[in-house]
Image (cartoon, coloured by chain):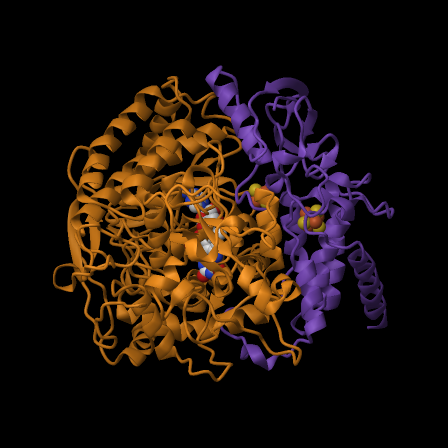
Amino acid sequence: MLESKIPSGPIEQKWDKARFDMKLVNPANRRKYRVIIVGSGLAGAAAAASLGQQGYNVDCFSFHDSPRRAHSIAAQGGINAAKNYRNDGDSIFRLFYDTVKGGDFRAREANVYRLAQISVNIIDQCVAQGVPFAREYGGLLDTRSFGGVQVSRTFYARGQTGQQLLLGAYQALEEQIAAGTVRMHTRSEMLDLVVVNGRARGIVTRNLVTGAIETHAADVVVLGTGGYGNVFYLSTNAKGSNTTAIWRAHRRGALFGNPCFTQIHPTCIPVSNENQSKLTLMSESLRNDGRVWVPKKQGDTRAPGSIPEDERDYYLERRYPSFGNLVPRDVASRNAKEVCDEGRGVGPGGMGVYLDFSDAIKRLTEPVVREKYGNLFDMYEEITGENAYKVPMRIFPAVHYTMGGLWVDYQLMSSIPGLFVAGEANFSDHGANRLGASALMQGLADGYFILPYTLPNYIASSSLEKVDTSHPAFAAVKEEVQQRVAKMVNIRGKRTVDSIHKELGKMMWNNCGMARSEEGLRSNLAKIPELRHEFWTNVNIIGGGEEFNQSLEKAGRVADFLELAELMCLDALQRAESCGGHFRVESQTPDGEALRDDDRFSYVSAWEWKGENADWVLHQEPLAFEYVHLTQRSYK
Amino acid sequence: MNLTLKVWRQQDAKAAGKFVSYQVQNVTPDMSFLEMLDLLNENLQTKGEAPVVFEHDCREGICGSCGFLINGVAHGGHRGTTVCQLSMRFFKDGDSLTLEPWRAKAFPVLRDLAVDRSAFDRIIQAGGFISAPTGGAPDANAILVPKNDAERAFDAAACIGCGACVAACPNAAAMLFTSAKITHLNSLPQGQPQRDQRTLDMVAAMTEEDFGSCTNHGECEAVCPKEIPIEFIGRMNRDLIHATLHRRGE
Ligand SMILES: Cc1cc2nc3c(=O)[nH]c(=O)nc-3n(C[C@H](O)[C@H](O)[C@H](O)COP(=O)(O)OP(=O)(O)OC[C@H]3O[C@@H](n4cnc5c(N)ncnc54)[C@H](O)[C@@H]3O)c2cc1C
Ligand code: SF4
Ligand code: FES
């Protein structure tokens, strides 16, 4: 069942070989093939635009009111590419190496190598579209170093890189919409997948304005529906980000890869009130100049300025003398949690650590710090009302990204033939930890440069029978969706959707967040089904299915999170090792660092849904490392 | 603090709407404006009443989903701020606030505070792009872009498509939005080949939708959360004249 389809041969030649071996579709025939693309973030919009240009007949769906609003818009920091414009020792191999190692050896080498190769073309493509990347005075592109790597390979557009990349893809997509190759269905949420004779052949959607349940048929279906970090309720993800599309596909047979791999970002603004609805990321570039510390004494409530130097614990510098404040995200996050658990956290509730710029201001002067980070300091002040030039910022880790997602082969096809998955929605190339500025790269690589090859190859090499929405499979799935909606709105219980979502989020944060123990995971596995039962018997959705109903939208998404959460805990429990963002307290070195267990866990876990009343079945895709040698990561 | 909200409630595009008053209690200064509305909605739902529909997603001022009028001012009137970034620190106990959707013919109300802004997408379809089919691009550094041009392009590209400029304009014109995209693309060397056509087509598309025309009130610039300068409208008009003259010359 788990055929990764990695081409043979040396790693540098695999993608070339794969492309040469692919079957092509005659340009005159392309119009006859219908492609459904769900999602118009970086991955979906890039794929829809590119396939439209090639002449396929594309239908693109988004629950947003415009493709320009996808969550990709919020990415700040930048996008990596092995351009080596700085002549500083970068290369495709180095980007590949950094990504495999940064992912703590839980990604496929062949995929990561291809990603590094394609990274170069992405920047070319985006510049041609008019993406206003930062420039130097000579007119050349500027880059910066990002996320603990030693080369300067991150291209950026002020602090709004995701916005500008998405607008580039969005504009290319709108051009195709005008040309008639792509039909855009906004405010349409995919609620199920239609599988006919073992192949993905369509979807069922709900029109979010009228509530109409509609069916759509195609020859291929692509999901570029983003990550599921909102299972934790509080995260840096946009409020609408959800798991529904991939979860529904999982229930129809698509294997789910590494569901427990979650990235928790170390520099976010701490939670300040119980009505808090989302968390705000502060760019990780702040760690280049800010120093992280907490008081040495527990429960020290003095103002930071009145805590003398020798009573401060610069714990990252102390524990990791060679990387200091620049350790990878997972390490920085876990250490912040530990000092807070020890009772040394700062700010309301003791859930925060200081990120202090006073030394940087002394060394560089305030105007220089302002020039580098002014917009971030302003944003911090807007939210907290505090001036970080005068008092240290308070930061705390927050859920940020999900490395897990639907399992795909080298062609980005899931275990359901004809169902492709791209961007954050697939289990992807980041292993157990994603490096900064690599998600944008992956989403665009998938959308612009991989799917436009692999999808035609699937079309050309499969004999696809004619299927339209009159096929009984469509009516059957539509009926199921309608019943589910009706069931939900008729519960008329006592609890709001948000109250249940928050309860789930707390459980996940406490037991499946930065540190995971067998005991905590087992407790979640017992409690999640109870909460699911609570949802299905006691949730209260005001209004009906045939209207613009935001509580119903949320309810559908939370219902799916309530199932996914269980699988995440199950996956975390079976993976009795620590790797990347997955820290099992039972598996650590004597000095408290994550301890991988390559003999037992060097595999991708791919879970198969067996029905509501049956257990999931675990499949394993073994990982082999031929080019990057397995080593224990050390940032000491 | 406790607030009185007068909120526009409208079931759907065809229904007549009206203002309904609500009290919101226990609002804390560290909440955001939308968290205050979340609180209202939790309370309404617990009482069995329909929550207020409003659009939002990123809640950090970048996606452009959110936006309504607070006491008649788009996004609430704090410089460079979307309504999702607005903090309750700026309000005080006993305040009475009126919330209503963008008012513009081109943006029909869908429900309560949510409107249909798809007209913006159609303006982009008319020419708000650089045709660069995937795969054919030259090396990124083969195109030199003077830093000042790149900076101006960026300033213009920062538009989030929220629609506040239209809502604030007495004529409901979409000039600031359209000029931002035209300035972004026309400032770059990559944008030159399609410059004239883009300008003509986007302006024509804008006129075809139900947007009004510009009579230089400047309200758009004042409410724009990304501080897009009105100067871009002047640029667009110049580009339009050039394009028209070029066409005549041909
Ligand atoms: C605050 C923040 C900052 C970040 N900064 C960076 C950075 O600097 N560099 C970097 O590389 N990465 C960064 N990331 C990560 C990166 O932004 C995302 O991983 C990436 O943009 C995801 O793109 P995507 O196309 O896969 O999905 P998304 O952009 O999430 O798009 C999902 C699309 O699917 C649609 N959709 C979802 N479900 C359905 C459904 N059921 N039916 C219909 N449509 C649906 C949505 O409408 C949307 O169009 C950041 C993330 C966050 C949260
Ligand atoms: S120009 Fe400003 S106000 Fe108008 S849509 Fe763009 S960001 Fe919003
Ligand atoms: S919710 Fe995204 S800009 Fe306000």
The residue located at (66%, 45%) in the rendering is B81
Name the residue at 60% across, 55% down: A389
Along the line of sight, the residue nearer the viewer: B239 or A197: B239
Q: Residue at x 32, y 43 (%)?
A: A247
* Front residue (pair A586, A500): A586
The color chain B is rendered in: purple
Can you give x and y, in whole percent of width and height, for residue A368 in the image?
63, 66
Left or right of B67? Residue A487 is left
Specify whether residue A141 is in view: yes
**Image spot of residue B2 (x, y percent):** 61, 21
Left or right side of A479 for B231: right
- Looking at the rendering, which quadrant does residue A470 occupy? top left
Quick check: A555 above or below A93?
A: above
Q: Residue furthest top?
A: B47
Q: A159 or A285, which lies in front? A: A285
Q: Is residue B245 above or below residue A413?
A: below
Where is the N terminus of chain A found, in terms of image quarters? bottom left
